[in-house]
Amino acid sequence: MSQHATVALKRTGAKVNRATCADTVYNAIKAGYRLLDGAGDYGLRRAIADGIVKREDLWNTFHARDHYVDPAHRYPPEWWGDDKKVTSPRFPCRRLGPMEELVDLGLAKNIGVSNCQGSILQDILRYSRYEPAVNQVELHPYLTQEPLIKLCKTLGIAITAYSSLGPKATIASKHSKTTAQVLLRWSVQQGLAVIPKSNNHDRLVQNLDVDQFTLGEDEIKAISSLNINLRLNDPAEIDPRMAIFA
């Protein structure tokens, strides 16, 4: 998989309307993006119809057998029902049942998980019929997660990093690159996939341009030394019943 294919697009939240999201995804695919987080059908059908890509060229993370909020009614539902109350889905993490059935039917080539720490991954590997191909987790210089990266590499599970554009990087000026590009390069150079958020087309194209320079080992270490185990996304802040990182 090329570096261009491992950098991905993520929509920036419910405030972006469906048409804008569709255009953003379509233009991102046209620019070279192939990994889409939570994209649903936004822009995918048009890109395939126009011959830009084939469906098998794309990865996306919209999958569920049952929804507590109909996607046609409101997407993404996040954690809330229409009653504004938090809805915490209850299912055994150790079983990837519905997604495994997609593989059985030939509708999916690989399946993955998200926000899984080591103990959960070990449980999944013990009980599931198909090993997850990827684990999507929050990962940036303030939350470097080296032990999890090492575990996933040992198990042959790829990591996709989200919330990757947090801290500033003074190294950027040395390379005549933006802070975002340096932080993306920091992830890509570790063999990680990345899903930066942007609906600005110029920045989408700019974010893909991370294979034109290389960070020195000292620079990688300097950025990693910013780690303070800070989570920018912790469901426990919404409801204590969702303290998945407790």
Image (tube, rainbow, N blue to C red):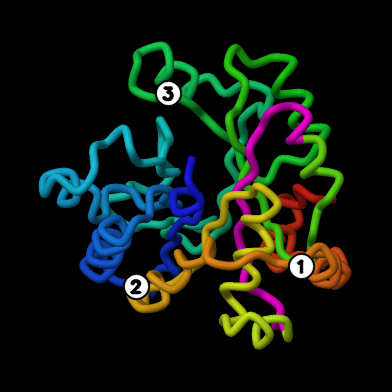
Return the x and y of residue 106 as percentages of the image width and height: 35, 16
The label nearer to you, 1 versus 2, is 1
- Circles 1 and 2, Cβ within 8 Å, touching? The answer is no
Q: Name the residue nearer the viewer: 103 or 235.
A: 103
* Cα gap from disc 1 to disc 2, whole angstroms: 27 Å
Disc 2 is placed on an element classified as loop
Q: Name the residue nearer the viewer: 123 or 7.
A: 7
The label nearer to you, 2 versus 3, is 3
Of the numbered discs 2 and 3, the one sitting upstream in the chain is: 2
Return the x and y of residue 150 as percentages of the image width and height: 81, 40
Q: Which residues are magenta?
A: 152-169
Return the x and y of residue 53 as percentages of the image width and height: 23, 43
Q: On the rendered structure, is 219 left or right of 26?
A: right
Q: Which mark is residue 217?
A: none
Q: Name the residue nearer the viewer: 225 or 72.
A: 225
Magenta region includes residue 104: no
Residue at left offset 62%, top offset 55%: 188
Q: Which mark is residue 16?
A: 2
Of the numbered discs 1 and 3, the one sitting upstream in the chain is: 3
Disc 1 designates what residue? Answer: 141
Of the numbered discs 1 and 2, the one sitting upstream in the chain is: 2
Q: Amino acid at mark 2?
A: Val
Residue at left offset 51%, top offset 29%: 111
Disc 1 is placed on an element classified as loop
Magenta region includes residue 163: yes
Disc 3 designates what residue? Answer: 109
Q: Which quarter of the figure has residue 58?
A: top left
Return the x and y of residue 147 as percentages of the image width and height: 86, 45
